Image (cartoon, rainbow, N blue to C red):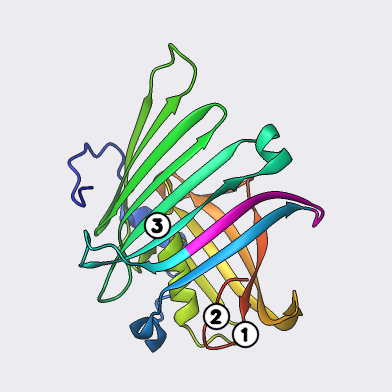
Amino acid sequence: MKLYPSILMVLVLPTSALCGWQNEVTTLKPGPFLKKLQPVHLSFELNWDGKINSGNLNLLFDRKDPRYPHYVITQIYGGSTGVAKGLFPYDCSFTSFLRKDDLRPAMFAAIETNSDERRETNNWYRSTVISKEITTPHRKGKAPKTKKSTFPFSKAPVYDLASAFLYIRSLDLKVGQEMVMVLHPFASPYLARIKVLRREIHRGLKCLRMDLKLQKIGPGGNLLGYDKMKTTTMWFSDDHELLPV
């Protein structure tokens, strides 16, 4: 797997157009926790309304791979299971290559498959995020489609999924604290607003309850609605590990 792409940049968003929201982006440096990162494997079982098992999700932080000695590798993988797999077959594998010095993303590779298609996404994170997405339909006679784009943003770090988790885990979080982060987990950038709501017991564990709101960053830097997930709730363990629960 190459870490330096040679692809055509076809979409450029002028940084001058981003001034409406870019001043809100959190520039707080990550805490010292990132320097003491330990390998962790988290496994989650997904369900419908707490009654029917519908899928599984695994998060591996700091997966060892001798082929990439200069990167911290994290992996997120899983898919639908049981009845849900029959109705909505879906499998995914997301791999992040993070720089060892600050655990910011260098490259992100994703493979997703469902009943209709296979989608492969590769992002390269420099001063400009370069993205390439290839969608291959399962149906014979349908040609693959390739989407290429770039996203320049230098006001604050741009995160993928794994690096965003690690950044949040590094902070000494307080109730009421808010973070505004630029995420580019797949082929498009998003603005995430995260707020620590309160401390509470969740599934028998002491947790920090957080609210997450997402907006898509469209052409020209305009913020657009994101209907797939307007808002959601996250829980992190209320201890020094701050693991997603």
Amino acid type, residue under disc 1 in the picture = Asp
| Distance in Å between CA atoms under marks 1 and 3 | 35 Å
* Residue 37 appears left or right of 138: left
* Residue 173 appears left or right of 5: right
Amino acid type, residue under disc 2 in the picture = Leu
Mark earlier in primary sequence (2, 3): 3
* Residue 10 appears left or right of 45: left
- Which label lies toward us, 2 or 3? 2
How many numbered marks does the figure carry? 3
Mark earlier in primary sequence (1, 3): 3
- Which label lies toward us, 1 or 3? 1
Q: Which residues are magenta?
A: 49-59
Name the residue at 80% across, 54% down.
49
Image quadrant assignment for residue 175: bottom right
- Asked if disc 1 and disc 2 are in contact, CB closer than 8 Å, the reply is yes
Q: Which residue is mark 2?
A: 242
Query: What element does badge 1 sit on?
Result: loop
Q: Which residue is mark 1?
A: 238
Q: Give the class, few, some or many, for how many residues have Cα within 10 Å of label 3's Cα (few <14, many ≥20).
A: some
Image quadrant assignment for residue 233: bottom right
**Rendering coords of residue 23 (x, y %):** 43, 70
Magenta span: chief secondary structure:
strand
Residue 53 lies in the magenta stretch: yes
Q: Which residue is mark 3?
A: 18
**Rendering coords of residue 63 (x, y %):** 37, 66
Q: Give the class, few, some or many, for how many residues have Cα within 10 Å of label 2's Cα (few <14, many ≥20).
A: many
**Rendering coords of residue 4 (x, y %):** 18, 50
Name the residue at 30% across, 44% down.
12
Query: What element does badge 3 sit on?
Result: helix
Amino acid type, residue under disc 3 in the picture = Leu
**Quick one: which residue is furthest to the top in this view?**
141
Name the residue at 57% across, 46% down.
79
